Amino acid sequence: MPEAPWPITFDDVLAARERLRPHLVPTPLRTYPPLDERVGGGIRVWVKHENHNPTNAFKIRNGLAAVTALTPEERERGVIAASAGNHGLGLAYAGRLFGVRIVICVPTTASVEKVEAIRGLGAEVVQQGTDYGAAVERAAELAREESLTLVHSTDCPAVLAGAATITLEMLEQQPDLEAIIVSLGGGSQAVGAMTVLRGLGRTIPVYAVQAEQASVAHDSYHARKRLTAASADTIADGLATRATYALTFDALVAGLEDFLVVSEAEIAEAVRTLIATTHTLVEPSGAVPLAGLVRLRDRLAGRNVAIVLSGGNVDQSLLSRILCAEL
């Protein structure tokens, strides 16, 4: 990979893993012959089950990594963040574990079930605007007004280090991986993966996949400049961002093998395929890497390919529509 300013170091990742170790067990990395058959191309698909975490999503790693990195003074003041759901859940879980006040700003369109889960973990919920961008703005305002520590879902080194522990685990579980595919909203998984590969001296390609209807990071990557979007309307709510982020953008441009988008129909089909072949629950954002792998099938033929199933928090109503092929 080209040398470029990098947002975190491999040592940051190792330190994050030590902070997480007492609180999280490694998630499974599994293969499923029926999934391999459906993907085709002689590809062996390795599914990293982040949906098996206590909050059913990888962002528990980010939340725990961020909260355990706070100073005593920062813990005393409390933490605020904006979230479409899973980042808020991760922080709420960490806040309950360590007795830290957590305030989560969510858009009014956020998953009702995710919001209920955040509240259930003891966090305060503030609803603002119709998308993640509006929630980010409100979180920044409240951070200033109430002297809370803002933990951004992407622009936070501890968050990136937490996400990187996914790849560290995968390579320990299966050293022979030949490609990694992640979904991308802000880029914590992708930058985390590339940080680990750099640290280990590995040249495994990392591919990022985004929803076609929330494609600003993809478009910015290919334009080689940071863009913004007026809207981000996708069933993959965890990827529904309207901007790129300072801490990850240059690293994504420097290190990704490729970045592609998939349609809403492809995402829905990937959800159905994963449920049918792995028999575990997956949310649309978590299924996006599989949709990308299908697009990349010819390029990755015959390889051991890891896809990160980043979460399984999906509302019943949306899941019903997907399973009934209404999307």
Image (spheres, helix red, strand yellow):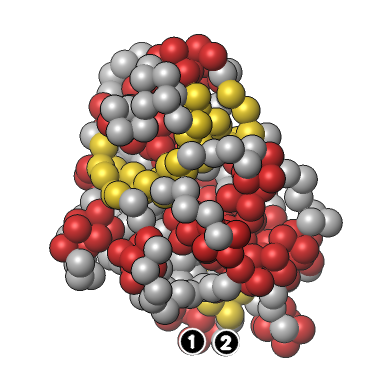
Q: Give the SS element for disc 1.
A: helix
Quick check: 53 left or right of 179? right
- Name the image quarter holding residue 290: top left
Work out which residue is located at the far right of the displayed protein and give it.
Answer: 22
Q: Position of residue 54 (x, y in %)?
A: 70, 43
Nearer to me, 81 or 6: 6
Please state which of residues 221 and 120 is positioned toward the viewer in this rendering: 221
Report whether 286 appears left or right of 133. Answer: right
Quarter of the picture holding the C terminus? top left
Q: Which one is in front, 3 or 135?
A: 3
Which residue is disc 1 drawn over?
A: 144
Front residue of this view, candidates 307 and 239: 307
Which amino acid, mark 2?
Ser
**CA–CA distance between discs 1 and 2?**
5 Å
Q: Looking at the picture, does residue 262 appear above or below residue 165?
A: above
Which label is found at residue 263? none
Expressed as whole percent of the image width and height from the top left, the position of residue 210 reads 31, 46
Residue occupied by mark 2: 147
Q: Residue at the location (50% across, 27% down)? A: 45
Up the image or down, 213 lies above or below 126; here it is: above
- Up the image or down, 309 lies above or below 103; here it is above
Kindly state the secondary structure of the residue where label 2 is placed. Answer: loop
Q: Residue at x 58, y 80 (%)?
A: 149
Q: Position of residue 197 (x, y in %)?
A: 53, 57
Q: Residue at x 54, y 73 (%)?
A: 8
Q: Is residue 114 above or below residue 63?
A: above
Q: Is residue 250 visible?
A: yes
Residue drawn at the location 72% of the way across and 69% of the way down? 15
Q: Residues within 10 Å of mark 1 (few under 14, many from 20)?
A: few
Instruction: Inspect this view and state whether residue 53 appears.
Output: no
Asked if the residue at tag 2 contacts the one at tag 1, i.e. Cβ–Cβ closer than 8 Å, the answer is: yes
| Percent position of residue 221, x then y | 24, 60
